[in-house]
Image (cartoon, coloured by chain):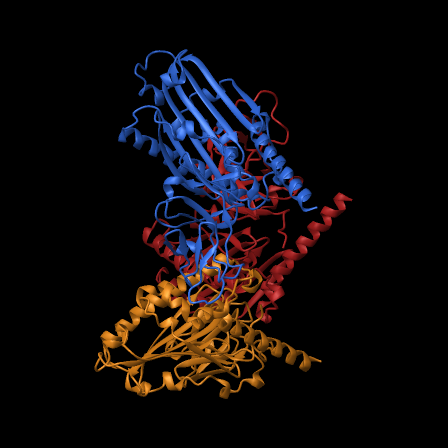
Chain colours: A orange, B blue, C red
Amino acid sequence: MAFLRDIWYPAGWASELNDQLLGRTLLDQMVLLFRDANGTARAIGGRCPHRFAPLHLGTKFGDAVECAYHGFRFDGTGRCVLVPDEEGPIPGGMRVPGYPLVERDRVLWIWFGDVDKADPALIPDLSERLSNPKYVALTGTIVIKANYELVADNLIDARHGQFLHASVLKGSGFYEAPHEITHEGHTVQINRLIKNTTAPSTYARFLPDPTIPVDWFTTTRWDPPGIFQLDNGCTPAGCDRDAGVRRPGVHLLCPETETSTHYFYASVRNYNLDDPVADEASREWQRIVFEEQDKVMLEAVQQAMGTTDFLSLHPVLLRADNTATRLRNTMRELLRKEEASRKSVAS
Amino acid sequence: MAFLRDIWYPAGWASELNDQLLGRTLLDQMVLLFRDANGTARAIGGRCPHRFAPLHLGTKFGDAVECAYHGFRFDGTGRCVLVPDEEGPIPGGMRVPGYPLVERDRVLWIWFGDVDKADPALIPDLSERLSNPKYVALTGTIVIKANYELVADNLIDARHGQFLHASVLKGSGFYEAPHEITHEGHTVQINRLIKNTTAPSTYARFLPDPTIPVDWFTTTRWDPPGIFQLDNGCTPAGCDRDAGVRRPGVHLLCPETETSTHYFYASVRNYNLDDPVADEASREWQRIVFEEQDKVMLEAVQQAMGTTDFLSLHPVLLRADNTATRLRNTMRELLRKEEASRKSVAS
Amino acid sequence: MAFLRDIWYPAGWASELNDQLLGRTLLDQMVLLFRDANGTARAIGGRCPHRFAPLHLGTKFGDAVECAYHGFRFDGTGRCVLVPDEEGPIPGGMRVPGYPLVERDRVLWIWFGDVDKADPALIPDLSERLSNPKYVALTGTIVIKANYELVADNLIDARHGQFLHASVLKGSGFYEAPHEITHEGHTVQINRLIKNTTAPSTYARFLPDPTIPVDWFTTTRWDPPGIFQLDNGCTPAGCDRDAGVRRPGVHLLCPETETSTHYFYASVRNYNLDDPVADEASREWQRIVFEEQDKVMLEAVQQAMGTTDFLSLHPVLLRADNTATRLRNTMRELLRKEEASRKSVAS
């Protein structure tokens, strides 16, 4: 299956990109991420056009990256700026692709499609969660050896929590709560809310008074191609969400290949902001839930599917799967539009 | 190459199936083995039809298995008996295949073909060897990364013993003994017998009087698809086989994939029944002969062949290979018959 | 891509072949190397024609090799000389290929093509470097998981030294020195010479007087299919090369598969002949330069290329790549000639 190209993809957390070169396969392409002399994050093709050395094995020289094999240098636009020992002009073909890259709200956003359409205004706004002094956010990155839509299925469908994550979610009964699903443009949002209930234990211990009734809420928002914004918490009944314990989350997916996915996650909280114990609890949650449970299951599913496409295997889907299906359909619709637009430009 | 389907395959030793779920790939299909609330062994498709999670990652609830991903439950017939949180009837397609499974003589027998033909009377009778108080049987299971017919070639052809297993068989000269080969139906049997000879050392030490002359015998019987029954031993010359030291063996093959095989073996003996030292000697034999020698050689052969079919590589076969060839031809004949029978039903 | 066949390939160092059997895949074929009773090196097909057991798992009996599986024996010509327990003549097809093999100047040379053309006079003469009492030669063998032409590109193009091997070559400026390239028949030779210069540190410490001006030289000679002879050193200005410190090298390539190469190297020197410290320095150089740097880079390049052919990926090549291109073109020319010659014989 082709990947949508005219859209911003998350390439990594800004904090992953330090002084070193970072090689990453995204949408089946080798990409080199690095910061130029000003610290501006750059993304260019990751394979030298001369003799195909991976550029991430090289070295940074100011604004340019030197290939480790023969010393060719490329700048942040992908232009070759130095060919050692060669007289005469640098051949026009001696370049790698340069990809629009925007660092915003702690995320590196990359664009693989038509450069003229790479409008930074189209980048999902994660500032509320990731650049907000009222929160602390703990980020992490893993690769899951499963197609990115399988990972999205997992994130949009909270039902699996009570089974796959039973060890930490302990059959709270929350998943039976009525929920509403809204669509606006390509955005899909699911809201669950139980009003005036007893605070569940995972929140209660952080509430000022764990004995008073609370409104318990979760919100999951999806935007293409794999941008998930969560909002989970408990607030004293009838109060604003910020009045209680709030754990918004961010999950960003970028296909590595057809059968593997970069999974960038952030656990965000509005309490104990400067508390290593709360940090450690959050890290433990990430390790258990994302790595030991989600990753293990999703990789087992991909293995059980082989390389056959999900829909070609005729899954037996139920009403509760409609939302996941809507995500897939939205991606297919966007892909069809993009292909049609390519063809009309070409003709 | 297609696998024969209308035949009982060994799926494992009964003792391998305890309270836990057991996932196993058989004939290229994911299968889940488990015991229901009565302890009855069951076999159903191993992949959830909803989102393709491997069912062996799940949990047993009474007679049913709960998928670890979304909590769907399937009973021992493959029928879905619970869809969490879903109103209305369970969709008809929400089921996995149920495979006839019979536990008999310590073996789990599974049927992948036409259910109407799954007659337990067709199961090879191993009771004499495996359910007989006069014997003790030590069972084991390994996977050999080689096509099951290569493993069968190895088992039917005793000549390799004096080379591949020279370290334990020590060039006894037994393989030069005259042998007779009999065929009856699809059964092939090879008998070797040396009358009135000195007991070989591996048997002598267990004989009441190692100095008296013995009749030394081996019998190998094959039935499709890969059922081997051996009978090896020494008995005082002229006496019944039970009068001496007797080591019947059982070797059961089930294809895992085109290039890997489940190999279930049992070493059986009629002496020192309750003797940990004799057990340990038997285990040591199994480890050396089956794991260090047969498995290593068979996997090297498969690697040397790549994925090319044995006959397509034009092996140079000799008279002594006729028996192995007969096994292959029998399997092909059965397969042709089965395909013809499928077509005549379809038309 | 097909491999050239009517040419001598290096199969290994003579010292690698002792009393044991040596199995090696060369040009995608399993080959067995062994010494017969006289110590003469032999090469035959590595897979038994009976049931495809790798012969290197077997045992040597005088001039023959016994297959570990069923005891068939093959002599150094590939002829089957023993079939255990079988009466009557050995079938004509029961043989493996016998390959012409010549042990010369510490190298085992093998011929896969038309046997009538296997003239030992065509073997490259490495005696000056490898059988010369004025030198000591330290040999080694590695497998590089990259196509052999990628390895040849690396060896013919000294420019990579100042980048990939910067840690040991320390930007000496030598690569900017003018060089001349000569062609004679299929031989390509590159000579670099800086006259009357200061001795570089890696040579200076072995010169009798490191302060006197030197002529600093490197020569790289290539012959098909992958025979590299180097000559590097410093000699007091105006003197013969033997008067100074001289480090000839030999690098021999033999394809293992399309994407892996046997790399046989020898580091040769004309000083401190019997000096374990100099030996150790040479071994350290080999470990760093060939294993940590060249091998790692070449395998990364092959991975970045996938299984696509180098030229199909449209590398952007420069003037300095002309020599590497000449090597490829020479190999293609030889291959075309060989194919044409085969066809004319066939018609």
The answer to whether residue A322 is visible is yes
Q: Which residue is more in the foreground, C246 or C126?
A: C126
Residue A53, given in percent of the width and then of the height, sits at 50, 67
The structure residue drawn at horizontal position 73% and vertical position 50%, both measured from the top left corner, is C340
Q: Which residue is more in the foreground, C347 or B78?
A: B78
The structure residue drawn at horizontal position 60% and vertical position 33%, both measured from the top left corner, is B330
Q: Which residue is more in the foreground, B289 or B65?
A: B65
B106 with respect to A278 (left or right) = right
Indicate the quadrant where residue A104 lies. Answer: bottom left
Residue B95, given in percent of the width and then of the height, sits at 50, 56
B42 with respect to C340 (left or right) = left
The structure residue drawn at horizontal position 37% and vertical position 63%, both measured from the top left corner, is A163
B310 with respect to A140 (left or right) = right
In the rendered image, which quarter contains the N terminus of chain B?
A: top right
A278 with respect to A118 (left or right) = left
The answer to whether residue C175 is visible is no
How many marks overall?
Answer: 0
Q: Is residue C281 placed above or below C43 in the rendered structure?
A: below
Indicate the quadrant where residue B270 lies. Answer: top left
Residue B169, given in percent of the width and then of the height, sits at 40, 26
Q: Which residue is more in the foreground, C315 or B312?
A: B312
Q: Residue furthest front?
A: B88
Residue C46, given in percent of the width and then of the height, sits at 54, 39
